[in-house]
Each structure stands twice: as structure tokens, then as C-alpha cells.
Image (spheres, rainbow, N blue to C red):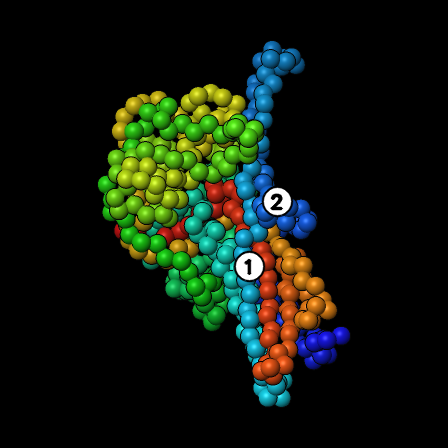
Amino acid sequence: MANSFSKEERVAFEQLLEGFQDALVLSRNVNVYNTDQAMMERANDTVWRPMPYISTSIDAASGTDISASFKDFTQLSVPSSIGFNKAVPFSLTSKELRDQLQEGRLGEAAKQKLASDINVAVMNVAANQGTMVVARTGAASGFDDVAECEAIMNEAGVMSENRYLALSTRDYNGMASNLAGRQNMTDLPKTAYQRAYVGMIASFDTYKLDYANRIGANAATVTMDTTGSLIDYVPAATSTSVGGQINVDNRYQTITVSTTTGVTAGDAFTVAGLNAVHHITKEDTGQPKTFRVVSVDSGTTMTISPPMISAGGGTDAEVQYQNITDVSTSATAGLTFLNVAAANVNPFWHRDSIELMPGRYSVPGGAGADVMRAATDQGIELVMTKQFDINTHKIKYRVDTLFGVTCVNPEMAGIMLFGQS
């Protein structure tokens, strides 16, 4: 077969795949949803994925007869796309190929970059779309910091297992320093001192990032009208348009404020008088609900996440998905921005909040280029193709991967910011 891979190249590709799989650190800690690739091509690489149901219960005051109490469930869903097409191209001349190590080094670099692309995509989704916000006034100091992340998740009713926290190197090492000084504990302080290792703390598996997003400072003065009819969001599975019923993405809401001057996407804020409620019991947590700015749409409107659902309208969907205390006043409330100082963004999330969706290229073999493909345990596929150019005596290589990352529930993910004094 023309341009077929040599035995050495196949061994190198197997080693590349093995290293690629080992390097997928963050992506191992999210859900994976595999799709039928023919269906995805017909659907423009987008499917709608369900959000978790939240049930309500009643008091069967009249005995066993609850015939008048049956309610409709509203199934919420979000669009999930295979939107990342990552490739590493390189070429080697017939002279360079005399040194087979060159190919191995370039393959190693390709593996490193593609694995990094997937990890960064997971981190970006958690950092930019997570709506739980923990703002700490000082530097990272250890257990108390992570315990705040645990508290905000517990108060929202997020499951206690499969929680993850990714920290920038400086913040992670600050926590390790705190642990290293705890002489009344064994093993963990020693490891923290020797390897700057934190491990599991306050129910979170922690990871150290050698890259981290940044968030800017916001000192804007913004107010909004908290009239219930203006801010009460009513979740809906579908809406009806000229073309019929279409799905609704319930992760976002557009609100009207006094001004958006100084506000940027990613900003985190609370609203005076709006407390978070436990997602299952609907009890007031006594803590302000945190929101993120998704986009600034005009001088007085912006899109936020999550939507403000107070159940003030009393519909079944509002009662099921209520996330803030009921608003019955028409007062103007101020927004308090939490990112008052520029800082590294440290994302944390529950596994069920983020989905990784592997894709697949259909590259024909024997069409002037040779093709090798293999998939990781998660189903993420690497495709390596090779083609020789007789004019230049160069062999072109490319290593490709195709995937998507979606935050299916922004209220099960968030960020921790330090230095917000």
C-alpha cells in the first residue's frame, strides 16, 4: 500500500496514544457521552443533553388519596456540540528521517499539546460557566478554603462524591505550605512538604494546574429592579415558534440593570436580598446566591447564569427548579461584585456537571495517505495520517482529535478566587 506506516512508526504511535491517555488528567474527572457519529453529522454535531430532574413531594394529608396532587415534570436540556477540531501538523525530510528519534520527539510534542488542549477545554468550561463562587479575602491557606467550596456545594444539595478542585500552582502550593506546617498529623504534612502535594481535602480531589485562567477586577456600581415579574425566570423544556416546537436552553437569563459600564463576561456577583436555596428541600441557606455574567448585551442588559428562579409564579417548573428565595418586593437592589481584585481562577466541579463528548474523523485509507487510528479508554480518538511529497522529499504528518465539552449544569460547578479583600 502506498505510504504505509512502518513497524517503527506503528510502535511510536502506540507509545504516543499511551502517553496521551496518561496526560488526560482533568478530562478523567468528567462524564463521557459517546454518540453515533453518522447521527452527529446529520445533526450538525449538536445534540441536546438532559439536565438532572429535581422532584417535589407533598404531604398526603387525606390518607392515600392524592389524585388531585399529580404534577407535570419539566425536563430541561442543554445543547452539546462536538466543537473542538485539534490537529498537530509536522513534516520531516528524507534526510531528517535518518534519525528516527526525530519522529518520536515530534510525536511526543503532538501528544503533549493535544492532551493539553482537552484539559484546557475542560478547565475553561468549569472556570467560565461554573456559577458557584467562593471569594477568599487572603491568599490560599489550606483546609478552610476548600471547606468553603464544600459548604456551598452541600448547601445546594450537590452529591458529596466525585468532587474536584483544580488550583493554580501558586494557590495549590500555598495550601501545601499550610498542610506542611501541621506537625500533629502524619504522612500528609510530610508529603505536602516534600512534593507540594495536597491530595483529597474537604471531600475534593485536588489537582495542580501549570496554567490557569485569570479574572479581572470589577468595581462597577450596578443596580437592578427586583420586581418579581421582571426577574422571575420560568423554566421551559420547549418553546413554540413559526417552525414549531424547539428546545430551550435554561442555563441563561437576560436581565436589565442600571448600567453595564465596567462589567465584563466572567464577572461574579450577588444581588441584595436574593439568597440561595437548597435545590431539593428549597430551604433558604442564608447565603447570597452567586451569579456569573455570560455576556454584556447592551448598556443596560446582560446575560447571566444561572437564571433567577424564585417560584414566585407558582408553576410546577418554577417550584421544581427554584434556586433563590421568593422575591415579592419591587425595590431596587444593588449588585455586589465578588471579583474585586484580579486573580487566578480555581475551578471546582462535580463530575455530573461537565460532559466530554468524543468525536471521530472518517479518514479513508489507501487514498494517497496512510492512516492509523486508536481511542483512549474514554473514547477520545487520535488519528495519525502520513503522506509523502515526491517533489520535496518531505513526509507530512498530522495527528488529529475531535471532541466537545459542555457544562450541563452550571449550578454544580464554580470557581474559587483568592485575594478578594
Residue count near mark 1 (Cα–Cα under 10 Å), binned few <14, some 14–19, many ≥20: few
Q: Which residue is drawn at 58% across and 32% down?
A: 75
Query: From what the image shows, is residue 21 above or below residue 335?
Result: below
The residue carrying mark 2 is 43
Q: Report whether residue 290 is seen.
A: no
- Quadrant for the N terminus in the image: bottom right
Query: From what the image shows, is residue 331 above or below residue 47?
Result: above
Q: Is residue 286 left or right of residue 218?
A: right
Q: Residue at x 45, y 25 (%)?
A: 311
Q: Report whether residue 361 is seen.
A: yes
Q: Where is residue 421 in the image (x, y as percent from the top left)?
A: 27, 51
Q: Residue at x 44, y 52 (%)?
A: 127
Q: What number is the disc on residue 211? A: none
Q: Which amino acid does label 2 sit on?
A: Ala
* The furthest residue to the right: 1
Earlier along the polypeptide chain: callout 1 or callout 2?
2
Q: What element carries label 1?
A: strand
Q: In this view, does 191 lie to the left or right of 21?
A: left
Residue nearest the observer in this picture, 104 or 386: 386
The residue carrying mark 1 is 85
Residue count near mark 2 (Cα–Cα under 10 Å), binned few <14, some 14–19, many ≥20: few
Q: Which amino acid does label 1 sit on?
A: Asn
Q: Where is residue 359 in the image (x, y as percent from the top left)?
A: 62, 55
Q: Where is residue 232 in the image (x, y as percent from the top left)?
A: 40, 27
Query: From what the image shows, is residue 212 above or below residue 413?
Result: below
Q: What element carries label 2?
A: loop
Q: Which image quarter: residue 48?
A: top right
* The furthest residue to the front: 391
Disc 1, disc 2: CB below 8 Å? Answer: no
Could you give the CA–CA distance between mark 1 and mark 2, rounded to whole angstroms?
17 Å
Q: Position of residue 409 (x, y in %)?
A: 51, 42
Q: Which residue is drawn at 55% across and 65% down?
A: 87
